[in-house]
Image (tube, rainbow, N blue to C red):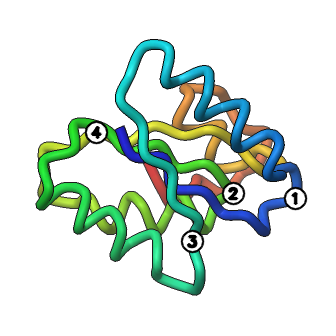
Amino acid sequence: MLVIVNPYASTVSDRLKNLVVYALRGSYQVEAIDTEARDHATELCREAANSGYDVVVAFGGDGTVNEAANGLIGTDTALTCLPGEEPTSTAACSGSRSTSSTPPSTC
């Protein structure tokens, strides 16, 4: 499992990232990587799919989820989300309904 972390998302901190990774390591082999620039999550997801990762966790906001989804298009690697900002499109990933009239651009 690869966890892609946007360290600039409003609720993401090193402490929270470490807690999430620690909890996941109880059941999974986990690697966590911070994004460093725009489109970095897309690149990381392409590499993860090519390396045989079964699942990628996008831990950030809409941009992180969107980039991760774009990097996994056409692959067998699953994507799941951990919201690191106010839930908008990340709510759509979990099946939640939005009060917005604009559909999310991801998931």
SS at badge 4: strand
Identity, as a three-letter code, of the amino acid under mark 4? Ala
Rendered location of residue 78, percent (x, y): 28, 39
Q: From the viewer's perspective, is residue 77 above or below residue 39?
A: above
Q: Please report whichever mark, 1 or 4, sits nearer to the chain's N-terminal start.
A: 1
How many residues crowd around disc 1 within 10 Å: few (fewer than 14), some, or many (20 or more)?
few
CA gap, disc 1 to disc 3?
14 Å
Taking the image as shown, residue 53 lies to the left or right of residue 29, namely left
Q: Residue 70, image x and y in percent?
A: 34, 67
Amino acid of disc 3: Thr
Q: Which mark is residue 10?
A: 1
Mark number for residue 35? 3
Residue at image mark 2: 61
Which element is circle 2 on?
A: loop
Where is 18 relative to 25, above or below?
A: below
Marks 2 and 3, Cα distance to the nearest angstrom? 12 Å
Whole-Å distance between the Cαs marked 1 and 4? Answer: 25 Å
The residue pinned by badge 4 equals 78
Q: CA distance from mark 2 to mark 1?
A: 8 Å
Residue at 72% over, 31% down: 19
Q: Earlier in the sequence, mark 2 or mark 3?
A: 3
